[in-house]
Amino acid sequence: MEHSFTANIKSVLQKHFKRNADKVFDQSQLIQYINEKTRSANKGSKARSSFANLYAIYVILEDYISKGFHKKGNYAEYEGAVFNKLFTRQRELPFGSNLQNHALNNRMNSEFQKYFPSSEFIPILRKPETNRYWFNENLLKIKVGATSFNIASAVIDIISEYSKTKQDAFQRFIKTCEELQEIENLNPLKVHEFILGLLAPNVDARLFEIVSYAILKFFYHDQIIIWGFEMDKLNKENLKLYKTGKTNANDGGIDFVMKPLGRFFQVTETLDFKKYFLDIDKIQKYPITFVINSEESTKDLIKKIKDNANKVYSIKAIVDKYMDCIEEVINIPTLNERFIVAEKQGCLKAILDEIILQSRVEFSYTNSYDDSIKE
DNA sequence: ATGTCCATTATATTAGGCAC
DNA sequence: GTGCCTAATATAATGGACAT
């Protein structure tokens, strides 16, 4: 039942209930339920996290506390919290902007019941005629020996803590970016180091994609291509790199596209390109440039890809066709070089700005998160 | 406003297959 | 047979749409 966030839960309980903390944990089904729902807290950015049900608890308890019911005992007389207020509030919370009514109406209750089939208490009580909501106080009052503890504010703290943990990694990243943005004129070296540090095999895949995009965009942006339909009417155009969407929303799609050459770029961690070249033996495929999150030399990477293709297709003609579809392989050392080139052209600040911009979009981050969650 | 059903996308678990 | 890897399948957590 224990996972890495359990320690945080216990330390909050410690603060609230001192030596009775462990007993409260053992006695409270609500705390145990929250413990179950916070498993994802310290997992990587790809782990799916649960917010809806926790926030449903959060907003009702926030109402409960704001009216002082954790101190005085006439909650039974209370007319209940208004649906709309609760609903709006949960959407203000970090990551909660798209939450719907489900958790408040039945998902939290039904899931709780799944964990505690024998529990006699339904956590969220409501009166459909008036659209009012209550939290079942029986789950908030925990008896240890002769004393009864109200866990409402402890629960609020735990959920805040969870929410903060989920924000942390990324928020820290954005913060660092913003700090650098301010001192950038004074200390380009630091910015340089920082961005180089982001080019490592262990960084978050989405971040890697963003950083490679920012670097390549400014590496290409002042390269000029000359083209035209007639020899005496030639156009000059800068190479422009476009990002085609959010990383996560772009499964199977192409990550970057370059105008006017029409090159496709795909960022990847693996060398297994099968999915990009499905049915390669039957159909002509569009060539792709791969940006690979690896320190290995380009030569080795290409060799590995080829070995892989040989294993799968075994016929030389098809393997050649497969390899022809790989326009270029860009590894981490190449990105490093291109970063330095772009930097020499004075694009350091622009690259940093681009990283911040793309990150904000990618992680749906806005500054308003900062003050919406209880400190 | 709310219950319900469906879709999407992720993780977790299991089954099956392979090299040794 | 053991251990390991991958593919298939199940499960979970929402988001979205719609009828009422």
Image: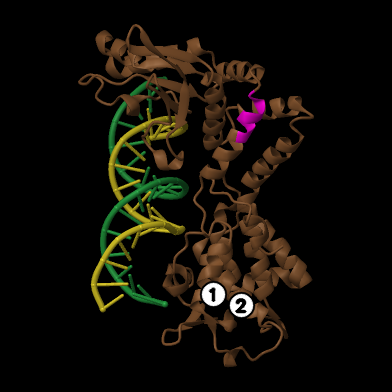
Chain colours: A brown, B green, C yellow
Dot 1 amino acid type:
Lys
Q: Chain of mark 1?
A: A
Image quadrant where one finds the N terminus of chain A? bottom right
Res. A63 mark: 2
In magenta stretch: residue A349: yes
**Residue plotted at (31% across, 24% down):** A277
| B8 vs A139, nearest the viewer | B8
Asked whether the viewer can see residue A109, the reply is: no
Q: Identify residue for label 1.
A: A85
| A129 vs A88, nearest the viewer | A88
Residue A23 is drawn in which quadrant?
A: bottom right
In this rendering, position of residue A120 left or right of residue A72: left
| A9 vs A75, nearest the viewer | A75
Image quadrant where one finds the C terminus of chain A? bottom right
Q: Determine contact: label 2, label 1, CB under 8 Å.
A: yes
**Residue plotted at (73% across, 40% down):** A179
| B15 vs A74, nearest the viewer | A74
In this rendering, position of residue A362 left or right of residue A174: left
How packed mark 2 is, by other alpha carbons closer than 10 Å (few <14, some 14-19, many 20 or more), is some
